[in-house]
């Protein structure tokens, strides 16, 4: 990694119309006082006007004018540097927007006007042969013929160029005969693009897109000239010292993730880079990638899992089965959802793969091969197996594809099993050694395109479908998570942390991101259900009865149970927020409605139900009674997962607002403005020595103490002496570890888990933790404790803070 400001921790700022470069600059002082080392910015290049996220880039050559442009970014850089902070920037290499009007994107305008002859034609991942040298442009609300008949399509002239207009769309007309002399239908038929209904995208689209988002077109950064053009501004910012690190969005969408990271490292001098890689199960990041690690979903899974009681799995499953009238099997649900995605959501992507198969196997049964291909996509258990065309295949990639082939063979009829073996052979690159020149091109492309299609199938089926259907404990339905993985044992967590310390010490860790389905604090509350399943069962039955007046026959039990968990997780929540979230949730679930051709009456019934229960005084009291009864366990989970994440191996990231209790749900709910003044006042009170007033103050105390300690002792957390060792305890309710290598700057961390169950058992009793020799002081309480066998009730008392950060007693506090 290149030299620069050492990245010890990051604070994610979600830039947009309500949080510009200038607004971010105004936060620099407070965030420096909080203790972070770097501001971590969402994408900064020119996006579509009013973008609330920045992942819809339209112009890579300039900074976003809506955020403040070059001048605003310069002020942010100066403010951050003056405060002692560096910057990390989110980069979107996989795709860019198809803006309205398309003239906002010079490369796309050129491609639509000149087709394959455009100097930008190589920028985009377009299968030109599929439509006879044209690119599908599905922006119409009807067919071309219907749009012409309704006079919705008109020819105009702008700045000396002939164009065609459709509502807000303005599209170029290629050079040729005067537009005024031709019938409109003939004129459109003569273009390098084919106008079509937006519905045609699902089956006929011939450019690669981001998942199923047709308005985001795939960019070919594997081409060195495209990489250089799309990364110049970001690379220059790194080389100049304005930016110290990069976060790479969706690397699995790229043709060659490893090659991309190598090129990026060469261009930036090896700056700190993390990748948004979703690791499934025991999958590990390829160890030859030129990066510091992932964006932290693997850590989120393990840290959060520490505070989920595995004994609650069966009772909660039984409750869900009782309420729904049927048992839920996540594996079967995933298979069904993937089938839906490959057949209904991504058939255009499957068809593109089949065109390659037809080139390689023109005489084989194409229908059978398609069934086999679909089954193989359904059977992949991860976002991608990293196979390089013509190159060697890692044992991990081979194992992933072998497993997918076995599962796919069980999904198809016996007559199609041979086709499964053939398609799996193609996916491994097995065709290449005996291919002709033309076949070799098709074979190489199939290897790449198959891998690029696996990710969208996983994401749309699991994250965006099953996670809105499975209701045993909705807090487990998280990005990178697995609803079947109910809790993480302490030894398992320690093994993970030791592996991170050894292999990826500079990986990012996180608990909340702009993409998480629920904030960390919502999940901390929901984890309490696993500790109190009997009490929860009784509570939810009462809630069900209370809601009778607000329910009509259209509100199904699955949705209702999903919403009751949401309510206790996010309370207090307004009816407006709950309705907005519920509408998104039921559309994503795709059981009774959908984003396209949804059931308006069903959605209205759900909205009425949400409004009713969110404003019902009796229901409100019932929710608040539950939260009050579970408050000690909620507190322990909230503070415990935070202290573990901030001080475990890796570079901790805080999503905006998560330094105090934040009860946000999935986007756009988690993009709501953050009250920075409130956070600043809270920190000032704590720094003045005032004791915490509430859980938010306590979380801020833990956060600031941990971040400042990381900054004061960088070698303990990110240097050669950044060791990790478990602390032995005699209770399953404690997790502890040491950072450092046995020196005077070592730090000890302890957290309470299963606090509700612990309290019901009478507390810590004689349970102990074994501390290194010497005298230690808790930075959070200023209490001292001697090394050796220490009573847990003295270190993390049930009537005090349930977490501890211990340093040698002769070292001054960092607060």
Image: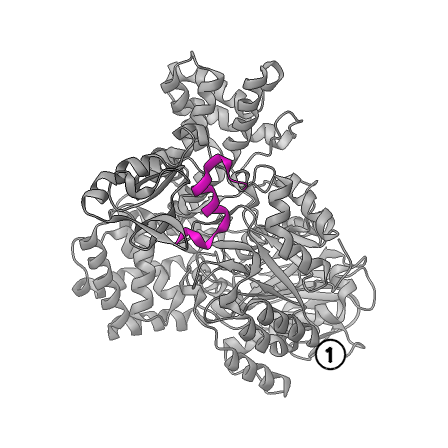
* Residue 291 relative to residue 413: left or right: right
From this view, report whether residue 796 is shown above or below residue 285: below
The reply to whether residue 230 is visible in this rendering is yes
Query: Based on the displayed image, in which of its 4 quarters is residue 174 positioned?
Result: top left
Q: Which residue is drawn at the image coordinates 40% and 45% (left, top)? A: 214
Does residue 77 show up magenta in the picture? no
- The colour scheme of the drawn protein is one colour
> Along the line of sight, which residue is nearer the eye, 473 or 282?
282
- Where is residue 720? Give x, y as percent: 81, 57
The reply to whether residue 633 is visible in this rendering is no
Which type of secondary structure does the marked residue at label 1 adopt? loop
* Residue 151 relative to residue 25: left or right: left
Q: Quadrant of the C terminus?
A: bottom right
* Residue 810 relative to residue 59: left or right: right
Does residue 108 show up magenta in the picture? yes
From this view, report whether residue 65 is shown above or below residue 392: below
From this view, report whether residue 335 is shown above or below residue 219: above
- Where is residue 730? Give x, y as percent: 64, 59
**Residue located farthest toward the top when viewing the structure as drawn:** 363
- Where is residue 102? Give x, y as percent: 42, 51
Q: Which residue is drawn at the image coordinates 44% and 28% (left, top)? A: 129
* Residue 808 relative to residue 375: left or right: right
* Disc 1: CA contacts within 10 A as few (<14), some (14-19) or many (>=20): some
> Along the line of sight, which residue is nearer the eye, 238 or 4?
238
Q: Which residue is mark 1?
A: 813
Q: Which residue is drawn at the image coordinates 62% and 51% (left, top)? A: 231
The magenta stretch spans which residues? 101-119
Mainly helix, strand or loop, the magenta region? helix
> Along the line of sight, which residue is nearer the eye, 633 or 371?
371
């Amino acid at each position: 990694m290149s030299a620069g400001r050492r990245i010890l921790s990051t604070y994610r700022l979600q830039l947009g119309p309500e949080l510009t470069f200038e607004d971010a600059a105004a936060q620099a002082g407070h965030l420096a006082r909080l203790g972070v080392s770097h501001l971590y910015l969402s994408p900064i290049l020119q996006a579509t006007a009013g973008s609330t996220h920045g992942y819809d880039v339209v112009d890579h050559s300039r900074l976003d004018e809506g955020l403040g442009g070059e001048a605003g970014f310069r002020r942010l850089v100066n403010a951050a540097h003056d405060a002692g902070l560096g910057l990390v920037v989110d980069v979107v290499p996989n795709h860019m927007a198809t803006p309205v009007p398309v003239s906002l994107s010079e490369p796309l305008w050129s491609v639509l006007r000149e087709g394959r002859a455009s100097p930008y034609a190589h920028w985009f991942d377009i299968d030109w042969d599929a439509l006879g040298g044209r690119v599908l442009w599905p922006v119409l609300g009807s067919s071309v013929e219907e749009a012409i008949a309704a006079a919705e399509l008109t020819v105009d002239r702008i700045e000396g160029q002939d164009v065609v207009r459709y509502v807000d769309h303005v599209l170029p007309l290629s050079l040729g005969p005067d537009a005024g002399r031709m019938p409109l239908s003939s004129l459109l038929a003569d273009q390098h693009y084919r106008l079509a209904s937006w519905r045609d995208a699902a089956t006929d689209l011939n450019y690669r897109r981001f998942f199923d988002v047709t308005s985001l077109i795939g960019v070919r950064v594997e081409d060195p000239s495209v990489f250089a053009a799309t990364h110049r501004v970001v690379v220059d910012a790194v080389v100049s010292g304005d930016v110290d690190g990069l976060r790479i969005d969706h690397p699995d969408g790229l043709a060659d993730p490893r090659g991309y990271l190598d090129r990026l490292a060469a261009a930036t001098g090896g700056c700190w880079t993390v990748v948004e890689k979703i690791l499934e199960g025991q999958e590990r990041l390829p160890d030859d990638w030129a990066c510091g690690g992932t964006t932290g979903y693997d850590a989120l899974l393990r840290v959060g899992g520490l505070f989920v009681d595995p004994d609650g799995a069966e009772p909660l499953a039984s409750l869900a089965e009782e309420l729904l009238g049927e048992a839920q099997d996540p594996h079967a649900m995933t298979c069904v959802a993937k089938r839906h995605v490959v057949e209904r959501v991504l058939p255009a992507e499957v068809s593109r793969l089949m065109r390659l198969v037809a080139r390689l196997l023109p005489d084989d049964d194409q229908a059978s091969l398609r069934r086999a291909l679909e089954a193989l996509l359904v059977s992949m258990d991860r976002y991608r197996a990293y196979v390089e065309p013509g190159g060697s295949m890692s044992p991990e990639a081979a194992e992933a594809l072998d497993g997918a082939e076995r599962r796919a063979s069980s999904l198809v009829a016996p007559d199609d099993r041979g086709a499964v073996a053939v398609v799996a052979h193609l996916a491994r690159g097995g065709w290449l050694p005996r291919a002709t020149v033309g076949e070799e091109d098709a074979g190489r492309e199939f290897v790449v395109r198959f891998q690029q299609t696996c990710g969208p199938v996983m994401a749309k089926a699991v994250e965006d479908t099953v996670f809105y259907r499975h209701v045993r404990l909705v807090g487990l339905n998280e990005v990178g998570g697995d609803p079947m993985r109910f809790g993480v044992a302490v030894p398992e967590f320690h093994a993970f942390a030791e592996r991170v310390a050894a292999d990826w010490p500079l990986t990012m860790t996180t608990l909340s991101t702009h993409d998480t389905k629920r904030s960390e604090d919502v999940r901390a509350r929901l984890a309490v259900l696993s500790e109190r399943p009997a009490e929860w069962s009784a509570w939810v039955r009462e809630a069900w009865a209370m809601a009778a007046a607000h329910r009509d026959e259209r509100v199904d039990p699955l949705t209702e149970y999903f919403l009751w968990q949401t309510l206790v997780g996010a309370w207090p929540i307004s009816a407006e927020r709950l309705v907005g979230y519920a509408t998104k949730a039921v559309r994503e679930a795709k059981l009774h409605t959908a984003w396209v051709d949804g059931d308006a009456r069903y959605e209205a019934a759900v909205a009425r139900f949400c409004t009713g229960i969110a404003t019902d005084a009796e229901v409100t009291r019932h929710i608040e009674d539950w939260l009050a009864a579970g408050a000690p366990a909620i507190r322990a989970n909230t503070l415990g997962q935070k202290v573990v994440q901030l001080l475990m191996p890796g570079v901790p990231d805080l999503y905006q607002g998560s330094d105090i209790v934040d009860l946000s749900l999935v986007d756009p709910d988690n993009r709501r403005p953050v009250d920075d003044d409130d956070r600043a006042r809270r920190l000032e009170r704590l720094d003045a020595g005032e004791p915490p007033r509430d859980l938010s103050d306590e979380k801020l105390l833990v956060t600031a103490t941990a971040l400042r300690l990381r900054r004061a002792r960088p070698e303990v957390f990110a240097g050669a002496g950044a060791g990790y060792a478990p602390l032995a305890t005699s209770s399953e309710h404690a997790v502890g570890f040491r950072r450092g290598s046995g020196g005077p700057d070592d730090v000890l961390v302890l957290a309470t888990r299963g606090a509700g169950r612990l309290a019901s058992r009478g507390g810590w009793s004689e349970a102990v933790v074994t501390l290194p020799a010497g005298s230690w002081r808790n930075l959070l309480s200023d209490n001292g404790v001697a090394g050796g066998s220490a009573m847990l009730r003295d270190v993390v008392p049930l009537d005090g803070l349930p977490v501890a950060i211990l340093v040698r007693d002769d070292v001054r506090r960092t607060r």
